[in-house]
Amino acid sequence: MSDRPQVICLMMTSPDGSLHPSRWTRSPDGVRSDWSSLYEKVHTLHSATAWMVGRVTMAEITKAGPHPPSGTPDAKRPHYFARPGASSFAIALDPSGKLHFSKDELYGDHVIVLLGSDVSDRHLAELAGDGVSYLVSDDKEIDVGAMLELLRKELGITRVLLEGGANVNGSLMAAGLVDELSLIVAPALEARKGSDRIIEFGEEGLADKVELSLISCDPLGHGAVHLRYSVKTPS
Ligand SMILES: NC(=O)c1ccc[n+]([C@@H]2O[C@H](COP(=O)([O-])OP(=O)(O)OC[C@H]3O[C@@H](n4cnc5c(N)ncnc54)[C@H](OP(=O)(O)O)[C@@H]3O)[C@@H](O)[C@H]2O)c1
């Protein structure tokens, strides 16, 4: 695992791997709000100090639009930690700097954005102006592993919950950056042709890239099951 935080991919899904609970069948065992409450409970039980999502998922959470500062921006690179003493964090992967924020926290967790090198100084100044922390990669592509190491070193983050969507889950799994898959499986199905699944990695998929091994399987109530797998890179 090197010196990076432990990464646990935590998702709520159906037995057919659907990413979108709003499209699921009903169940006599429970309703979506029951399963979401169980998800939140498991989230807390994992005792992580940070959660991390992809740009598309974060765009559904932060609804802010662009509001770049006027004048010549004074942007710090490669990183800016607005609240190094914060006790919990919300991390977004946003290689091109498409996300905007209106405050420095989400659900009480301090926001950190991981960015690619092409992001403009004006965008960095906007983030800093909103009290948001950021890390800029050396490259256009984000080196997530190196950034996680830095977050552990600088902010003491030792466990991160990776919470979607499919794209970010798949790309981090393929990169060998996920240690555990933790699933809340609800008694429901989507079953649409070509539906989005909770983990996707392009045309090639993850065959030969990861190996799962069962850690535990526990009923949670309301027909849901908590499945935990360790995730390893094949040797
Ligand atoms: N069932 C659940 O519990 C659950 C949980 C979370 C989300 N969701 C749903 O999932 C959907 C979004 O999923 P999604 O797969 O479309 O998008 P996503 O994973 O949220 O975000 C994908 C984007 O994140 C950036 N990204 C991903 N991997 C990266 C990497 N390794 N390095 C740098 N940047 C990376 C890229 O941004 P750029 O495009 O800017 O390059 C990429 O397009 C939403 O509808 C959301 O509601 C469901």
Image: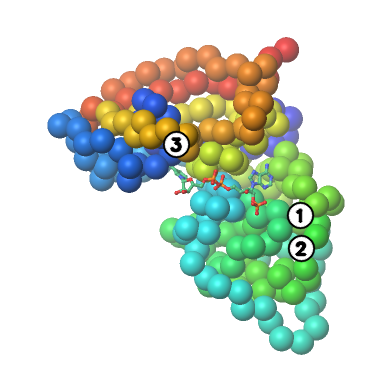
Left or right: residue 92 compared with residue 229: right
The N terminus - image quarter: top right
Return the residue nearer the eye: 50 or 115: 115
Q: Residue 226: x, y in percent?
A: 36, 26
Q: CA distance from mark 3 to mark 2?
A: 32 Å
Q: Residue at label 1?
A: 116
Q: For residue 202, which quarter of the picture?
A: top right
> Is residue 179 visible to the viewer in this orientation of the structure?
yes
- Per the image, label 2 sits on a secondary structure element best described as loop
Q: Earlier in the sequence, mark 1 or mark 3?
A: 1
Asked if labels 2 and 1 touch by Cβ distance under 8 angstroms, the answer is: yes
> Is residue 42 visible to the viewer in this orientation of the structure?
no
Q: Residue 9: x, y in percent?
A: 52, 34
Q: Residue at label 2?
A: 119
User: Which residue sits furthest right?
Assistant: 138
Return the residue nearer the eye: 12 or 109: 12
Q: CA distance from mark 1 to mark 3?
A: 30 Å
Q: For the residue with label 1, is its CB less than 8 Å from the closest atom of ligand 1?
A: yes
Q: Residue 160: x, y in percent?
A: 56, 40
Q: Nearer the viewer, mark 1 or mark 3?
A: 3
- Per the image, label 1 sits on a secondary structure element best described as loop
Q: Residue at label 3?
A: 195
Return the residue nearer the eye: 143 or 22: 22
Above-or-below relation of 125 to 191: below
User: Which residue sits furthest bottom?
Assistant: 71
Local packing at callout 3 (Cα closer than 10 Å; few below 14, some 14-19, many 20+) is: some
